[in-house]
Amino acid sequence: MLMNSFIIEDSPTGLTYCFVCGVKLEKFEMRVHIKKKMRKSEFYHLKCFKPRLPQYIREKDITINKLEDGHKKIFQEWINDWNSKYFPLDSQPTSNNAISTLMHDKSLSTTATRRRRILIEVFKFLDIYDLSKSLALVNKEYYHATWEPELWRCLIVRDFNEEASIDNNLRHKYFELFKTCCIECKKIPNRCNYYMCPLIKRILCLNCKNLDKYKLIGKTEIKTLYKICPKVLNIKFGISRKLVSVVYYGLFLELLKNFRQKNKKTVLDKLYEELDDNCKLVRDIKEIDTANMDKAFEKFGRIERIEPNWDCDNHDKDYKMLYNFIRSGHKKANFKKIFQSYKGENN
């Protein structure tokens, strides 16, 4: 590493000149002396001298040669002023320095190199699948970083709220918890109190299994209850333990809502070609809540049938036809006939 190295001294003769201003350096005048290999030495007035490198000047890089006390004080003020602009090269960053959080965080008990510590700080925010598969294939450095115990200690705290001893094989410890902990509550259920989710292949305790976001609906139920073809929703099904095509119920409802919003926009765009908001049909279509178009009838805790949830007092056949199209994509409307019925009327 290149450093600012020089000699500070009282000039022993009056035969040298300042390299910057060209003025003669008097005998016993303080000067900066820089030795050059294969070239003549350079001499400077202290006020003319500017170190070549913009960095902290260490004591061990300065040679003080026969400097009187008054000059020592002047030089000390000069060196303090210069160093005040730079961070000391020999000391650790202080705790309030931005670098310290990343490079010298006390939570990191690893003995890894500085660069690997940086990778650990980044990797601990990533998905476990990226860490265990993708990143390890990037290069040798990334591979070794993905095996660092401190990384897996951070991940165990993040994903399972558990402190682990750095002495253990923490990568194996993480995957042991990954396979046995409930994905929702982070607790390890006993043998009689867990359920393996068929889609994500993760453990759920029986309490968490009953949460709405983990409920499943099959392809056949979608067809029979909602009277809609799953293909139009572009659903990616998984296979349950009973070899039935299933999807999370919450995900299905979100896809269904988006499908209906798209249909509603198509209908309104078409109606606005000939009609406006003065038409009651247009106003009623605008008020349709695409997230609340179904009325479910349950029996013994299971949905027995689903019917349209007419959410306004417009029950004419044109409204119902458009409502059904928005709801399921079936029975495309005859807009030409609708325009003939409503155009020119003040509804």
Image (tube, helix red, strand yellow):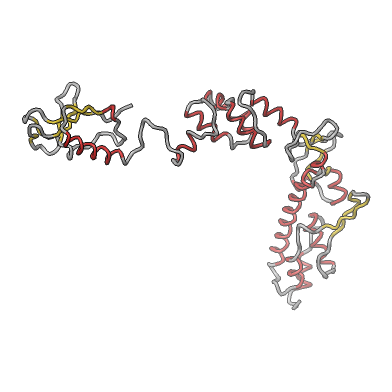
Image x and y of residue 264, in percent: 73, 60
Residue drawn at point x = 84 percent, y = 61 percent = 309
In this rendered view, identify the residue nearer to me: 240 or 107.
Answer: 107
Q: Residue furthest front?
A: 69
- Is 176 placed left or right of 241 in the picture? left
Q: Which quarter of the picture shows residue 13?
A: top left
In this rendered view, identify the residue nearer to me: 156 or 119.
Answer: 156
Residue drawn at point x = 64 percent, y = 23 percent = 169
- Is 153 placed left or right of 59 in the picture? right
Q: Which quarter of the picture shows residue 314?
A: bottom right
Q: Residue furthest bottom?
A: 346
In this rendered view, identify the residue nearer to me: 198 or 316.
Answer: 198
In this rendered view, identify the residue nearer to me: 136 or 24.
Answer: 24
Image x and y of residue 345, in percent: 75, 77
Q: Relative to 265, say whether 241 is above or below.
A: above
Q: Residue furthest top?
A: 38
- Is 227 placed left or right of 287 in the picture? right
Quadrant of the drawing holding the N terminus: top left
Image x and y of residue 158, in percent: 64, 37
Residue drawn at point x = 69 percent, y = 67 percent = 272
Image x and y of residue 125, in percent: 59, 37
Quadrant of the drawing holding the C terminus: bottom right
